[in-house]
Image (cartoon, rainbow, N blue to C red):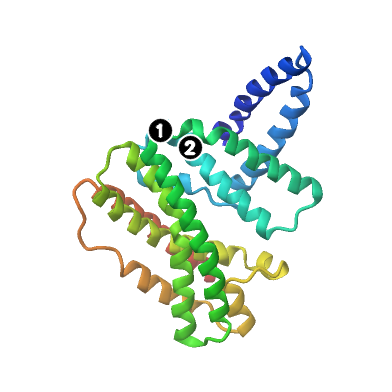
Amino acid sequence: MRLYEETVHENINYLKKLERELYGKAELHKRVHETLFKSARNLTKKWLAGEKYLRTKYARDAILEYPKKVLKLSIFMDAYINLMDDLLDESFSREERALAISEVARIVSLRDKYITDNSMKNRISDYFNKIIFVAVSEQIFLKKMKNKEGEDFYKVAYDYFAGRSLDMDLFLEIPLHELKYKKNEIDEIVRVGRIFRTINLMKKDLIDLEHDIEFDIPTPMVMLHQKGKPFKDFVEYVFSHALGDVPPRSSKNAEPIIHNLVNLTIKEQKEITRLLS
């Protein structure tokens, strides 16, 4: 978290130069520093409290030789997606919204300097196309779920989570690309990363149930609650279908990371079981 907050100094160094060019002295940057540090801290507090999930952390847990060179880039991408999600879903005050927008602008101003090559740039571009797909398909699946019951509901809801799980892809691709993994190896790992993220997202929606009901945020869990249906059967359906998609064999280089992702998935499964007990 400190690594992310310290990137504020990179913005301030530029702003001090800009202020000297404009006015011949640097004074206003102190107030700007306070504002930017506050906007960065607002997000890191949510990460520490578990209100927002840091996908970079899960990637680091799975990839034990995570390259430090791309860590900031990954965290910037995490922050950007978290902030955009908040701007869409949360009821912010005027000041909170202004701080969130300032933080988005701050991240964008720094992000590109950490992109290592054109291939990485293309992966980030592809990722934003995936996010567009997730945003559109999410609404389609939610609409379909309203009129479904039983296993028909479960199937659509599973597809909903599987679609949202694409948001994990880049956070595995960034370090794996830097480590020179082959395309087929990255694809194998990303596939299992999506399985992990499917279970991880379901846990997050269970934890956020009261918040989502209060702020009228539709999720499969909210809909099951509104229908008066138990969560357990749906959770078991997701467990069996997601873990059933884990490939029985993988390439030599990919296997250790896939093993770690499966263990992370099982850990999430146990936490969900505990939440429902």
Q: Amino acid at mark 1?
A: Thr
Q: Amino acid at mark 2?
A: Leu
Disc assigned to residue 73: 2
Q: Determine whether the residue tagged by mark 2 lies in a helix, strand or loop.
A: helix
Disc assigned to residue 116: 1
Crowding around mark 1 (Cα neighbors within 10 Å: few <14, some 14 to 19, many 20+) is some
Q: Determine whether the residue tagged by mark 1 lies in a helix, strand or loop.
A: loop
Most distant residue in the right direction: 94
* Image x and y of residue 72, in percent: 49, 35
Most distant residue in the top direction: 24
Disc assigned to residue 69: none
Compared with 218, 20 (above or below) is: above
Residue 270 visible within the image: no
User: Are discs 2 and 1 less than 8 Å apart at CB?
Assistant: yes
Residue at 75% over, 16% down: 26
Viewer-nearest of labels 2 and 1? 1
* Image x and y of residue 108, in percent: 58, 38
Q: Nearer the viewer, residue 64 or 94?
A: 94
Residue at 20% over, 59% down: 249
Crowding around mark 2 (Cα neighbors within 10 Å: few <14, some 14 to 19, many 20+) is many
Report, in whole angstroms, how far the alpha carbon at label 2 lies from the one at label 1.
9 Å
Examine the image and state in which quarter residue 140 appears.
Answer: bottom right
* Image x and y of residue 149, in percent: 52, 87
Q: Nearer the viewer, residue 242 or 103?
A: 103
* Image x and y of residue 173, in percent: 37, 46
